[in-house]
Amino acid sequence: MNRHFARLALLLALPALHAEAAAPKGHPLFDAAFTEGYQVRVEDLDYRFYAQTIGELELPTGQLVACDPLVSCDGPFIQAVPKGRYPLQLAIARIGDDERVAFARIVFAPGPATRWEMALVKGQDPATLAPDEFFGYGVDSGTGGFMDAAALRSYEARRNQEGEAFDERLFAELDKTYQHTRSWYLLPTDAGNVAFFSSGYGDGAYPSYFGYDADGRLVAVVTDFLLVPER
């Protein structure tokens, strides 16, 4: 077994906290969790946050995909995003001696979001959801990701062509950033890059949300790894 997956398998075997479904209109921590030193107490546990900027995500077409890039990816979100290069951040939560990736965020513009809307792919209708349900992507490798649809096509073509050798190089890059419970990597392609990052307590289904400011401008997109229960 690859060392990266072996470590993940051990970590994912640890008991996980119960994670409730995120509210369809967003979560009170989507902005606050990226503030250095922010802390909150939920269900008798203290969560202390800090943000880590892992680089810039390149979006040449503005068709954003969020998925588990080591397993499978659906199509891009219906909502287009601005083309360009944007900061990619992870909100790390300290819970006692443990640290986990709680949220992943792409920042499109400065300022806080005043409204959050669930990110949807073609064929998803939020009107069909019960109050405690959401649309999100499945994770089966302990890894989430962001990428442009063009970068996804390039990545999948290379992976299919090069096979196991490609995966070994990819896992070696993830090993370079590995810290207890998590790692990340930005893989360059000929059409943007593909971001890989560990997903909270590991496998599951995780929603993403678009954040808009008071003027209706898109300021961020966040994936919630459901680490922190709703208060």
Image (spheres, rainbow, N blue to C red):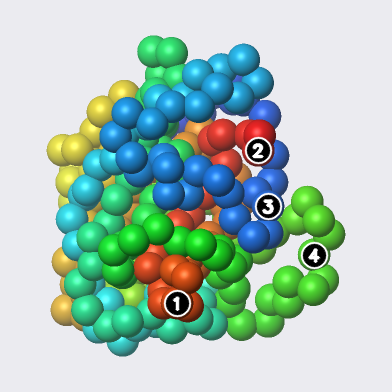
Dots 4, 3 in contact, CB < 8 A? no
Q: Name the residue rendered at 43%, 83% in the picture.
A: 80
Task: Please identify the quadrant where the C terminus is shown.
Answer: top right
> Which comes before the other along the chain, label 1 or label 3?
3
Disc 1 residue crowd, few under 14, some 14–19, many 20+, Cα 10 Å: few
Dots 4, 1 in contact, CB < 8 A? no
Quadrant of the rendered image containing residue 78: bottom right
Which residue type carries mark 3?
Ala
Dots 1, 3 in contact, CB < 8 A? no
Which residue type carries mark 2?
Glu
> Which comes before the other along the chain, label 4 or label 3?
3
Q: CA distance from mark 4 to mark 2?
A: 18 Å
> Which comes before the other along the chain, label 4 or label 2?
4
Which residue, given by chain and number where applicable, does mark 4 sit on?
Answer: 129
Q: Name the residue rendered at 47%, 49% in the picture.
A: 30
Where residue 230 appears, as percent x and y from the top left, is: 65, 38
Which residue, given by chain and number where applicable, does mark 1 sit on?
Answer: 215
Where residue 12 appears, as percent x and y from the top left, is: 51, 28
196, above or below 9, in the image = below
Res. 150 in view: no
- Check the image and name the residue furthest to the front: 214
Q: Name the residue rendered at 43%, 49% in the picture.
A: 31
Where residue 44 appears, as percent x and y from the top left, is: 62, 15
Which residue type carries mark 4?
Leu
